[in-house]
Amino acid sequence: MYKNDETKTLSDLPELTRGLLSGETDEIAVMANASALIFDLVPDLNWAGFYRSSGEGLILGPFQGKPACVRIAPGRGVCGRAFESGEPIVVPDVHAFPDHIACDSASASEMVVPIRRKDGTPLGVLDLDSPTPDRFATIREIILSTAREIEYALG
């Protein structure tokens, strides 16, 4: 399935994220480079990107992968629920998740992490999709640490 040393290989992702985003103040540039880095370095993803808070739910932000749903209503799907709760959600099987929004029918698992600015205001969510069931079980903590580096860069 995955290399036994995948966690070790990806353990540098938070540090690489910090280095890549260091000194950048534009939110779109930070999200664009972060999604590109994650998509490039994390094997077996079919989507990596952001949904931003729009006041009327979430709106598509910078991403890597196939075209995606543009707007997500408050509380809908994995992204809407994670944003609303303020807590990360890891879904091993999206087909078993009530109200899952299937932007790409190839997705089998998903991880969504709420992203906040340093002042605590919600920015949106980091959304990762994989065609493999339970893809994020072994790398959950690495993705959470990477998300914290993205938040730090967003100031």
Image (cartoon, helix red, strand yellow):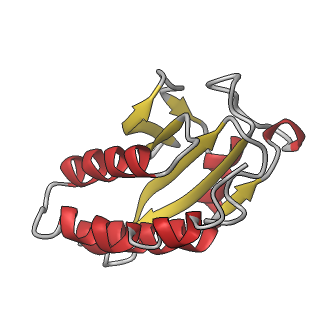
Q: Residue furthest right?
A: 96
Q: From the viewer's perspective, is residue 9 above or below residue 56?
A: below
**Does residue 20 appear left or right of residue 43 in this picture?**
left
The front one of 128 and 134 is 134
Expressed as whole percent of the image width and height from the top left, the position of residue 113 reads 55, 61
Q: Residue at horizontal 16%, vertical 69%?
A: 22
Residue 121 visible in the current orientation: no
Count of residue discs:
0
Left or right of 70 on screen, residue 7: right
Q: Is residue 42 visible?
A: yes
Q: Nearer the viewer, residue 138 or 152?
A: 138
Q: Image check: 40 left or right of 68?
A: left
Point out residue 150 in the picture as x, y percentages from the top left corner.
34, 66
Relative vertical location of residue 28 with respect to residue 11 in this rendering, above or below: above
Which residue occupies 62% across, 25% down?
103
**Residue 39 image-quadrant placement:** top left
Q: Is residue 52 above or below residue 146?
A: above
Residue in front for this viewpoint, 141 or 127: 141
Q: Please name the residue shown 45% across and 54% down the image.
A: 124
Quarter occupied by the C terminus: bottom left
Residue shown at 49%/51% (left/top)?
42
Q: Which residue is the extreme one toward the front?
A: 4
Q: Position of residue 19 (x, y in %)?
A: 20, 69
The picture places residue 18, in percent across and down from the top left corner, at 26, 71
